[in-house]
Image (cartoon, helix red, strand yellow):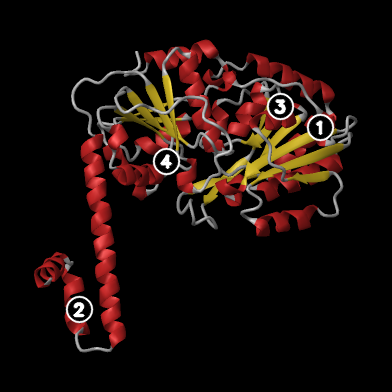
Amino acid sequence: MKSRLLQIWRRLPTPMRRWAHVTIGLPRAGLDRLGEAVAEHQRREAANAALRRALRNARPKGRLPTAPVTIIGFHGAVHGLGEGARMLARGFADAGVPVRALDLSASVGFAAEIAPAFPPPEAHERGVVISHINPPELLRWASATEGRLLQGRRHIGYWAWELQETPSDWRPAFDFVDEVWTPSAFAADAIRRVAPKRVKVTPVPYPLYLNPRPAPDRKRFGLPDDRVVVLVAFDLRSTAERKNPRAALRAFQEAASRASRPATLVCKIVGADLYPEILDALASEVAHDPSIRLLTDNLSAHDMAVLTASSDIVLSLHRSEGYGLLLAEAIWLGKPTVATGWSSNVEFTDPASGVLVDYRLIPVEGDGVIYRSGEWADANVDDAAEKLARLISDDAWRRSLADATERNDHVSFNRDAWTTMIRTLAPLN
C-alpha cells in the first residue's frame, strides 16, 4: 500500500506536492482537499491515457480500402447536425458508395427519434470513417472507445464552425484525422488557419438535392391563404445570440407596418423546452401582435419541409452560419430568402433568388458557452425591414425570385455536381 501511495505521490505535479507539504498538520479540511486533488489528478491521468491509446489506434497504417463509408453522427436526432449526417449518408449512397451509420445521439443527450437508414459497421470492415461531429465530441468519443472504430480506417472529420476563428481546444483533434471536410468555404477558411500542413481541408456542402419537395399545406398549420407568410426558424441549442431571432421579429414588425399587403410571421422554435426563459421573453415581445405566431411543435423533417413550402419568404438575420441549412432548404423549395449578407449562406444565395441584408461586424459577446471570441455580423434591422416590406408588397418581384431558385447551380442543388465532387475527392475515387 505504501509503495502504491509513493508511486502516486511521485507522479503528482511538483506544485501539488509542495502544496501538500504545507497542508500536513492543517485541519482535516486541508487533507480532504489534498485527497480531492489526488483523485482529480488520477482521473486526468486515466483520461489522458485513454486518449493516447485512442490516438495509437486512430493512426492509419499503409494503403487503406475506400469502402464502405461509415458516417458517425447524430443520425437519430431532430437537429441540424442530425439532418446533416443523414444527408451525407444518403448522398454517398446516391453516389453508389456502400454506407454504414453509427448514431451517437444518446451520448450527448439527444433523443434518438429517427431510426438510422443504414446499418452500423461490422467489426471486420475497414474503408473510410467520416465523423460528422465537431472536435470536442470527437475527442470524447475517441477516448471513450479508445479509437477502436478508427483502427485500420481512413478518417475524415466533417466539421462545421460559424466564426472566422476556431477554438483553441479543437487543435488536439487534428491528430485523429487524415483530412477535414466542411459544409462551406467559409468554415474551411477558418479551420485552415489552425490546421497542420499535413491535414487537407476541403469544403463539401450538403446534398440538398436529395430532399423532397412537398406541396404547400397551409391548412395543416392554420395559416391564412390571403396573407403573405414569412417564416423564421431556429434551434435554441444553436444559441439565440447567434440565430438572433429578436432582430428578425423587429424587422418583420417594421416591414409589416410599411408593406401594402398584410403579412403573417411564423416563428418556428426548436429547443424551447430547454430554454424556457428565452421562449418567455420572445412570447412577451409579440404577445400583442396577432400577425406573429410562435410555433414550438415538434416537427419531422417532412413536416418542416411542408411548413417551408407553405411560406412565401424565409427570413434569417443570423449573426453567423457555418452552412445555413434552413436558407439552403428554402432555396431548394423555391422560396425567396432575406438574410444577413455574411458567412456561409452567401455562397449559395444567388442574387437573382435571394436578398442579402446589410450588416457590420461586431465583437462576439454574450454567448460564452460556445462562441467566446472573434467577430460576427450585426444585421441592419432597418435595411432588412425595407427589403422585406418591398418583397411582401411586390408579388411580381417575389415570383421572379422564386422562379430563379430553379436556376441556382450551387453544388448543394445539383446532383451531377455533387456526385462528381464526391467521386473525385481522395480517397473515394
Q: Nearer the viewer, residue 25 or 257?
A: 25
Q: Is residue 261 left or right of residue 26?
A: right
* Mark closer to the chain start, 1 or 3: 1
Between marks 3 and 4 in the image, the one whose residue lies nearer the viewer: 4
Q: Which residue type does callout 3 highlight?
A: Pro
Q: Which residue type does callout 1 highlight?
A: Arg
Q: Nearer the viewer, residue 243 or 117?
A: 117
User: Mark 3–mark 4 contact, CB under 8 Å?
Assistant: no
Q: Which residue type does callout 2 highlight?
A: Ala
Q: Does residue 369 sit above or below 381 in this rendering? A: below
Q: Determine the CA span between mark 1 and mark 3.
A: 22 Å
Q: Which residue is mark 2?
A: 20
- Residue 386 position, x and y percent, is 76, 38
Q: Determine the CA span between mark 4 and mark 2.
A: 39 Å
User: Mark 4–mark 1 contact, CB under 8 Å?
Assistant: no
Q: Which mark is residue 336?
A: 3
Q: Does residue 269 sit above or below 43 in this rendering? A: above
Q: Residue at x 25, y 76 (%)?
A: 34
Secondary structure beneath disc 3? Answer: loop
